[in-house]
Amino acid sequence: MHATATPDGSTLELEPLHDYLLRELGPADTRMPTLEQFSGGQSNPTYRLIWGSDTYVLRKKPAGSLLPSAHAVEREFRVMRALRGSAVPVPEVLALCEDPQVLGTPFYLMAYVPGRVFWDPSLPGMTAAEREAIYAQVLEVIAALHRIDPATLGLANFGKPGNYFARQFDRWTRQYRAAQTENIPHMERLIEALPARLPATGETRLVHADYRLDNLIFHPTQPRIVALIDWELSTLGDPLADLATHCLAWHLPKRYWGMADVDLTGTGVPSESGYRARYCERTGRASIDDWPAVLAFALFRKAAINQGVVRRALQGNASSAKALDITRVCHIAAAALALLQPTSDKQDAT
């Protein structure tokens, strides 16, 4: 029996996968495929699949008990298939398997896109010109995404229109409660204070909901994005929430994949305010009301997601020992709460 071991101690049987590949992709090779799990990320396990001379990417739901509506590989498949050929670069998706008899959980196959992934948003080791070019491209792609009318892609029913912030706050509060492992006072205060500051209903656009540098694949040598990946949280929603999630890199410390504690002077990395202003220009928006509250919402959502990772780690279903870090949830919640304080309170606190 051919099988591949996974970091959580389980195994993936390769014979059923081989049979599936023969059915879906044709008799490319009679040999067993090989799977090599990519490092990084705590969500859906992702593998490099080598079958004969061809290389693919396989992305599946994790094993074990999962939170409702989480790890939606089926939605990832649908949205990337719809975006193919648009101004937003995505990998070509090839097949979706919802039969648990093949690999235990649903998965999909997509083309392997070679390129560079940058994990540190401060982009160490690059010149100021290189950083500037990369961030200009990152901005262009998120602006292009938010200019798309979802109906033109057949995605008019990809989510509920209107009342996005309130619905998302309710969803992530419930997800946080379902994954809660201990009492975190800052999260409790956020749950009480944030609803009164949530923005009213705005535009409805396709939102990625996890648009960050390490979910972008860049050309091997050029400052050009060749693929935006990890669409499991995507839906129809307010593009400001998507922008805020993306801008969290400016508000989180380096140890949490941010750059709030990095001196960006002269580096070519734009300031968050300048970056946000250029986004407004590219999307035809005059201004953004109560940006701190939008950021606080994005931080609250991130804290809730990280709490879910902690819960799965305790159950043995996360892909990294780092997932057990509850202090990350506490830090993110504290940062969100600080944004909701009046300016005078912040000055008094310092």
Image: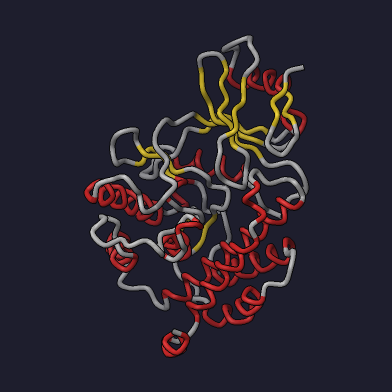
Instruction: Reply above or below: 157 against 109.
Output: below
Colour approach in the figure = secondary structure
Direction from residue 12 to residue 77 in the image, left or right: left
How many numbered marks does the figure carry? 0
Image quadrant where one finds the N terminus: top right
Taking the spot 59% from the left edge, 62% from the top edge, the residue there is 328
Direction from residue 17 to residue 59 in the image, left or right: left
Taking the spot 63% from the left edge, 20% from the top edge, the residue there is 21
Image quadrant where one finds the C terminus: bottom left
Q: Residue 304: x and y, percent?
A: 63, 63
Taking the spot 39% from the left edge, 37% from the top edge, the residue there is 116
Given residues 108 and 149, the one toward you in this image is: 108
Residue at far top of view: 30
Direction from residue 185 to residue 255 in the image, left or right: left
Q: Residue 65: x and y, percent?
A: 77, 49
Instruction: Reply above or below: 146 against 217.
Output: below
Instruction: Reply above or below: 34 against 101.
Output: above
The answer to whether residue 242 of the structure is visible from this angle is no
The answer to whether residue 68 of the structure is visible from this angle is yes
Instruction: Reply above or below: 201 against 65.
Output: below
Q: Residue 277: x and y, percent?
A: 29, 67
Q: Residue 162: x and y, percent?
A: 53, 68
Given residues 104 and 263, the one toward you in this image is: 263
Query: Which image quarter: residue 308?
Result: bottom right
Taking the spot 44% from the left edge, 66% from the top edge, the residue there is 251
